[in-house]
Amino acid sequence: MSENGVASLERAFCGECRERMLRAQAIVEKGVANLTVEDWNQLYQDFDSLYGAARAVNLPDMEDLARAMASYMRFLKRRSFQGLGGPPGALLQRTITLTTRCAGAWNDCMQHAQVDELRSLVAELRAAVRKPAAG
């Protein structure tokens, strides 16, 4: 694919990413304890869709983050009906903030310290799903 074609796909990905993160932010602002089944499903769908889109444009760090977030959404949805312990919304909010920041300045995001932040967040998300806090 030409360089212009790749750049066009990346711009389309960033636009989709911003749109989905704005929707996710609006949902999260309700507070984790107030989310409905439909909200959890929408959050899962948004991150799962970003996973596929990141994979299609060969952005492996964002692909990993979106995949880990989709898994975390499933985990939180299951736990929300058992009573959430700790601040699960904080990890969700950090992910939305970082993903939005990356979509707004993609080249800077993927070339600087934010890549390390992305990878660290992926590790935290995976750990949260493997070893949930007592609730």
Image: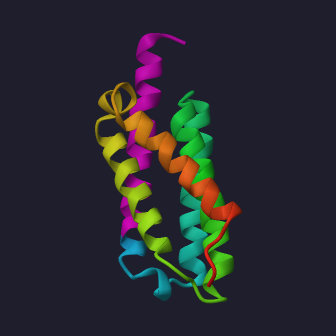
Residue 46 is left or right of residue 89, and the answer is: right
Whether residue 3 is visible: yes
- What colour scheme has been applied to the protein in the rendered image? rainbow
Q: Residue at x 55, y 37 (%)?
A: 54
Query: Was residue 11 drawn as part of the magenta stretch in this picture?
Result: yes
Examine the image and state in which quarter residue 89 appears.
bottom left
Whether residue 24 is visible: no
Residue 82 is left or right of residue 47, and the answer is: right
> Is 6 above or below relative to 117?
above
Residue 92 is left or right of residue 48, and the answer is: left
Q: Quadrant of the N terminus?
A: top right
Q: Residue at x 43, y 47 (%)?
A: 17
What secondary structure do most residues of the magenta stretch adopt? helix
Residue nearest the viewer, comparing 51 with 78: 78
> Is 79 above or below relative to 4?
below
Indicate the position of residue 75 as horizontal and vertical percent values.
66, 69
Indicate the position of residue 129 as horizontal and vertical percent values.
66, 63
Indicate the position of residue 36 as horizontal and vertical percent values.
55, 85
Residue nearest the viewer, comparing 80 with 26: 80
Examine the image and state in which quarter residue 114 appears.
top left
> Is 109 above or below relative to 135?
above
Q: Residue at x 41, y 42 (%)?
A: 117
Indicate the position of residue 5 as horizontal and vertical percent values.
46, 18
Query: Was residue 29 drawn as part of the magenta stretch in this picture?
Result: no
Q: Quadrant of the C terminus?
A: bottom right
* Magenta segment boundaries in residue numbering: 1-25
Q: Residue at x 57, y 83 (%)?
A: 84
